[in-house]
Image: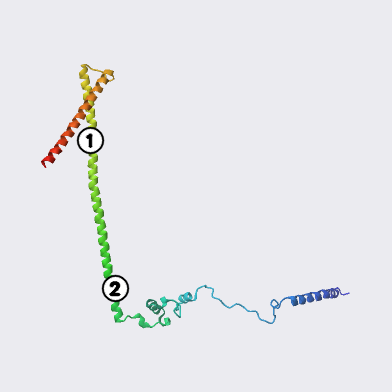
């Protein structure tokens, strides 16, 4: 008995059922999803992978960026001259634009001369203003230096007056102490109460004399002013 033939015979029903199932599933799918075996597959067309704009790519390839003007700048004389100088006849620019007429040249020279004169005038005015600011600054510094000299003189005078007043106070104190000692006729300790009492009296008398002297000096000064006014 042939075992291989028996196995093939037993598999035939299963294969038939699979074929029926696949045909039924294919019939149930929509027409858009069912591929046509006779149609050839389509492939995407070649694309530019550089990612550059056409005008940028033209510049890279040393070609005219735009075949037609896309901005008012492309209509200017400067742009057209540059385009002709770089791309030549491919720029579609009339070479005549690269040469000035006699009238245009004269007008440009006049404009340049006027601009130069204005620039020179502006420069001279700026220099004059700067010089005036410098002179004003130097004058202010000179005035402050003069004041500084006066301030120094006043400060030295105040210091000298304070030193003189301090020296006079010391001398006055020593003089009063000597007068008290002469009053007692013998050497007395400065810590003695009698000495302190007598010294206090002497100081009061000295202050009264100083006050009287200041009053007299003030009166004499006022009298001198009155006499001066009367004589005038």
Does residue 86 appear left or right of residue 166 in this picture?
Answer: right
- The correct choice, above or below, for 5 with respect to 204 in the image is below
Which mark lies nearer to you, 1 or 2? 1
Residue 110, quarter of the rendered image: bottom left
- The correct choice, above or below, for 198 with respect to 28 in the image is above
Residue 11 x %, y %: 83, 74
User: Who is closer to the viewer here, 199 or 14?
Assistant: 199
Bin the neighbour count of mark 1 within 10 Å (Cα to Cα): few under 14, some 14-19, many 20 and up. few
Q: Is residue 192 visible?
A: no
User: Who is closer to the viewer here, 64 or 141?
Assistant: 141
Q: Is residue 138 visible?
A: yes
The mark nearer the N terminus, 1 or 2, is: 2
* Callout 1 secondary element: helix
User: Who is closer to the viewer here, 56 or 181?
Assistant: 181
Does residue 159 appear left or right of residue 13 in this picture?
Answer: left
The residue positioned 20% from the left and 27% from the top of the image is 209
* Callout 2 secondary element: helix
Check disc 1 and report the residue beneath it.
161
Residue 40 x %, y %: 66, 81
- The correct choice, above or below, for 101 with respect to 150 in the image is below
Check disc 2 and report the residue beneath it.
112
Residue 84, quarter of the rendered image: bottom left
The residue positioned 14% from the left and 38% from the top of the image is 226
Disc number placed over residue 98 in the picture, else none: none
Bin the neighbour count of mark 2 within 10 Å (Cα to Cα): few under 14, some 14-19, many 20 and up. few
Residue 147 x %, y %: 24, 46
Residue 95 x %, y %: 37, 82
Could you tell me how far apart the alpha carbons at marks 1 and 2 are, in whole angstroms? 73 Å
Q: Residue furthest right?
A: 1
Q: Quadrant of the C terminus?
A: top left
């Amino acid at each position: 008995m042939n075992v291989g033939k028996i196995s093939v015979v037993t598999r035939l029903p299963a294969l038939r059922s699979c074929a029926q199932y696949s045909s039924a599933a294919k019939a149930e799918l929509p027409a858009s999803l069912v591929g046509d075996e006779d149609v050839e597959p389509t492939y995407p067309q070649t694309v530019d992978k550089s990612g550059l704009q056409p005008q940028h790519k033209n510049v890279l390839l040393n070609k005219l960026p735009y075949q037609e003007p896309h901005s008012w700048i492309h209509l200017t004389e400067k742009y057209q001259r540059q385009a002709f100088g770089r791309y030549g006849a491919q720029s579609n620019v009339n070479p005549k634009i690269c040469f000035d007429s006699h009238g245009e040249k004269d007008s440009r020279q006049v404009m340049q001369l006027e601009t130069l004169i204005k620039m020179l005038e502006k420069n001279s005015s700026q220099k004059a203003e700067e010089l005036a600011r410098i002179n004003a600054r130097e004058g202010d510094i000179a005035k402050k230096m003069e004041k500084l000299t006066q301030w120094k003189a006043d400060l030295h005078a105040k210091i000298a007056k304070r030193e003189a007043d301090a020296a006079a106070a010391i001398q006055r104190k020593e003089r009063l102490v000597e007068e008290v000692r002469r009053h007692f006729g013998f050497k007395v300790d400065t810590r003695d109460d009698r000495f302190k009492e007598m010294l206090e009296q002497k100081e009061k008398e000295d202050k009264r004399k100083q006050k009287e002297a200041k009053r007299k000096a003030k009166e004499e000064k006022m009298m001198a002013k009155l006499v001066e006014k009367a004589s005038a």
